[in-house]
Image: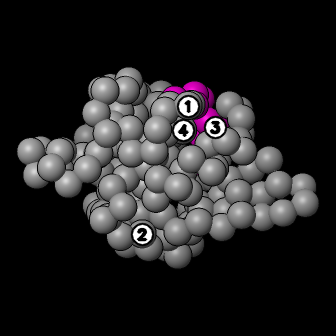
């Protein structure tokens, strides 16, 4: 089991022994980079450190990796127009390459880099995130249900 994310094509592929699943994603609007505070998507080999949100309803709002009790809808979006919405599920990534995406000012886990759901109104295939990998809610729930903690994730720019 392995995940490959290509930020150039804005595609996530989930490889299983007998099948490959493909999903359109949205990586960082600011491009690629490792540095904390850059709001860029980090490159390299990662691992799924934690799965958060199992059994939550679709469009559940997660704040600080916890269910806020809110379900995303248009009135909530209007109330908080500048919120970076993290919805439905979180696959929290941890870098595996010291000095590149692990430890110090380049640590993906400490940067809170996730694969997560986003409002359905947000386009996929276009880099618009704040560093994370965004997916539609239905896609992130499907992926979440198939992967395990420890699954490797490669993020590339080519």
- The span shown in magenta is 42-52
Disc sitting over residue 55 in the figure: 1
Q: Is residue 154 above or below residue 122?
A: above
Disc sitting over residue 124 in the figure: 2
Task: Out of 132 and 32, give the one closest to the viewer.
Answer: 132
What residue would you read off at disc 4? 91
Q: Is residue 148 highlighted in magenta?
A: no
Q: Is residue 27 above or below residue 95?
A: below
Marks 4 and 2: CB-CB under 8 Å? no
Sequence-wise first label, 3 or 1: 3
Residue 26 seen in render: yes
Q: Is residue 47 highlighted in magenta?
A: yes
Residue 43 seen in render: no
In the image as oriented, which residue stretches furthest toward the right?
18
Name the secondary structure under disc 4.
strand
Name the secondary structure under disc 1.
loop
Disc sitting over residue 73 in the figure: none
Task: Out of 32 and 143, give the one closest to the viewer.
Answer: 143
What residue would you read off at disc 3? 47
Number of the front mark, 2 or 3: 2
Q: Is residue 146 left or right of residue 90?
A: right
């Amino acid at each position: 089991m392995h995940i490959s994310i290509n930020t150039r094509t804005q595609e996530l592929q989930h490889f299983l022994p007998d099948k490959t699943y493909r999903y359109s994603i949205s990586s960082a609007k600011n491009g690629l980079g490792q540095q904390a505070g850059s709001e860029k998507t980090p490159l390299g080999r990662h691992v799924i450190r934690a799965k958060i949100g199992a059994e939550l309803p679709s469009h559940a709002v997660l704040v600080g990796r916890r269910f806020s009790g809110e379900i995303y809808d248009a009135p909530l979006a209007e109330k908080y127009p500048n919120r970076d919405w993290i919805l439905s599920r979180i696959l929290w990534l941890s870098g595996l390459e010291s000095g590149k995406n692990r430890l110090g000012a380049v640590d993906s886990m400490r940067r809170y880099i996730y694969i997560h759901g986003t409002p359905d109104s947000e386009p996929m295939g276009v880099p618009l995130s704040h560093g994370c990998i965004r997916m539609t809610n239905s896609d992130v729930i499907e992926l979440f249900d198939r992967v395990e903690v420890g699954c490797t994730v490669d993020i590339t720019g080519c």
